[in-house]
Image: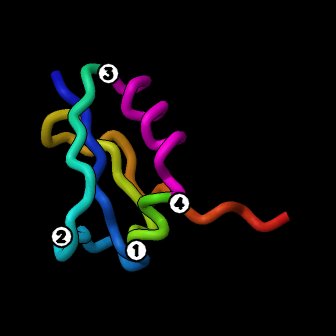
């Protein structure tokens, strides 16, 4: 099984109109560690939220890359 991130805009539509990393991970933990290290660059590239997929199954969606306000 492989895990990957789907990059989305603020409305939840997949962002496909720009070059973005297309990493594949052997585990959910590896994928989550990677997003924790790379979310700022993705946000700067116009990605607002992400969905985590295991193969074609959505584990979760709507994970905002914007920091929470205090």
Would you identify the image quadrant in which residue 55 lies? top left
Q: Residues within 10 Å of mark 3 (few under 14, many from 20)?
A: few
Q: What element carries label 4?
A: loop
Q: Is residue 40 left or right of residue 24?
A: right
Point 42% across, 60% down: residue = 42
Could you give the CA–CA distance between mark 4 and mark 3, rounded to whole angstroms? Answer: 21 Å
Could you give the CA–CA distance between mark 1 and mark 2, rounded to whole angstroms? Answer: 11 Å
Q: Please tell me which residue lies in front, 13 or 7.
A: 7
Whether residue 5 is situated above or below residue 46 in the rendered picture: above
Point 33% across, 40% down: residue = 59
Q: Earlier in the sequence, mark 3 or mark 2?
A: 2
Q: Is mark 1 on a helix, strand or loop?
A: loop
Q: What element carries label 3?
A: loop
Mark 1, residue position: 46
Mark 3, residue position: 27
The disc at residue 16 is: 2
Task: Tell me if residue 38 is in the magenta stretch.
Answer: yes
Q: What element carries label 2?
A: loop
Mark 4, residue position: 65
Would you identify the image quadrant in which residue 61 lies? bottom left
In contact (CB < 8 Å): disc 4 and disc 3: no
Q: Position of residue 20 (x, y in %)?
A: 26, 59
Could you give the CA–CA distance between mark 4 and mark 1, rounded to whole angstroms? Answer: 10 Å
Stretch of the chain drawn in magenta: 27-40
Q: Where is residue 11 in the image (x, y as percent from the top left)?
A: 38, 79
Colour scheme of the picture: rainbow
Could you give the CA–CA distance between mark 3 and mark 2, rounded to whole angstroms? Answer: 24 Å
Quarter of the image with the N terminus in it: top left
């Amino acid at each position: 099984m492989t895990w990957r991130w789907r990059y989305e805009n603020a409305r939840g539509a997949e962002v496909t109109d720009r070059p973005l990393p297309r990493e594949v991970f052997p585990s959910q933990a590896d994928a989550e560690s990677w997003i924790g290290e790379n979310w700022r660059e993705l946000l700067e590239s116009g990605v607002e939220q992400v969905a985590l997929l295991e193969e074609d199954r959505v584990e979760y969606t709507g994970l905002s890359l914007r920091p929470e306000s205090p």
